[in-house]
Image (cartoon, helix red, strand yellow):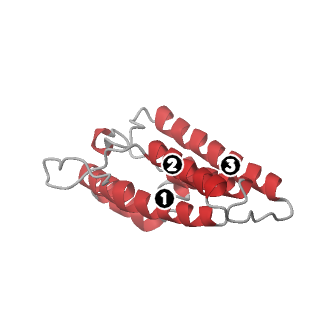
Amino acid sequence: MSAQGPAPAAGRARPFIPPPVLALGAGALIWAIARRAGLPAAEFPGRLPIAAALALSGFLIDLVSIAAFVRARTTVNPLAPEKANALVVRGLYRFSRNPMYLGLLLILLGWAAYLAQPLGLAVVAAFAVLIERWQIRPEERALEEKFGEDYRAYKKRVRRWL
């Protein structure tokens, strides 16, 4: 199934599945693999604290990132980046253009570690690829159209992920 929705007026595909829903699907797939695949668990020292640290870090990154959007009084809706009325470039957005997606990625890494499922890492990698193709690229096009040179300068200063 494609995560591309109907083409907007500019003729470009746009996402229609919210990234948190994709992350939940990826998490469910990791769980299904861990429970049903019959693959051995990959226990390692410090697994539970590492899993908790990854997931908590991801959750906190997401909260701080969302708060930055709320403070800027702009939309947090990833399906409608064209509705943004401010370019958020402060806080975590000085280091990553996509800290919310980075947070989801860390939560999934923590989940895979908690379940001790190495194949879960492939699911996390697939999630990153899908988010980049289906969400980030269309979002970047919309923001560039909306904010022009300001967004292009921001893209030059700040990396997509980290």
Circle 2 crowding by C-alpha within 10 Å: few under 14, some 14–19, many from 20: many
Residue at 80%, 63% in the rendered image: 43
Res 114 visible = yes
What separation in Å lies between label 3 and label 2 (alpha carbons)? Answer: 13 Å
Q: Nearer the viewer, residue 29 or 160?
A: 29
Mark 3 and mark 2 lie on one chain; the one further toward the N terminus is 2
Residue at image mark 2: 23
Quadrant in the picture for residue 11:
bottom left
Secondary structure under tag 2 reads: helix
- Measuring from the top left, give residue 162's x and y in whole percent: 56, 64
Amino acid at pointer 1 = Phe
Does residue 128 appear left or right of residue 147 in this picture? right
For the N terminus, the image quarter is bottom left
Residue at 33%, 38% in the rendered image: 85
Circle 3 crowding by C-alpha within 10 Å: few under 14, some 14–19, many from 20: many
Res 160 visible = no
Quadrant in the picture for residue 86:
top left
Residue at image mark 3: 55
- Measuring from the top left, give residue 45's x and y in whole percent: 86, 63
Q: Are marks 1 and 2 in contact (CB under 8 Å)?
A: yes
Amino acid at pointer 3 = Ala
Quadrant in the picture for residue 40:
bottom right
Across the whole image, how many numbered discs are drawn on residues?
3
Mark 1 and mark 2 lie on one chain; the one further toward the N terminus is 2
Mark 1 and mark 3 lie on one chain; the one further toward the N terminus is 3
Residue at 47%, 50% in the rendered image: 89
What separation in Å lies between label 1 and label 2 (alpha carbons)? Answer: 7 Å
| Label at residue 127 | 1
What separation in Å lies between label 1 and label 3 (alpha carbons)? Answer: 16 Å
Secondary structure under tag 3 reads: helix
Q: Nearer the viewer, residue 33 or 106?
A: 33
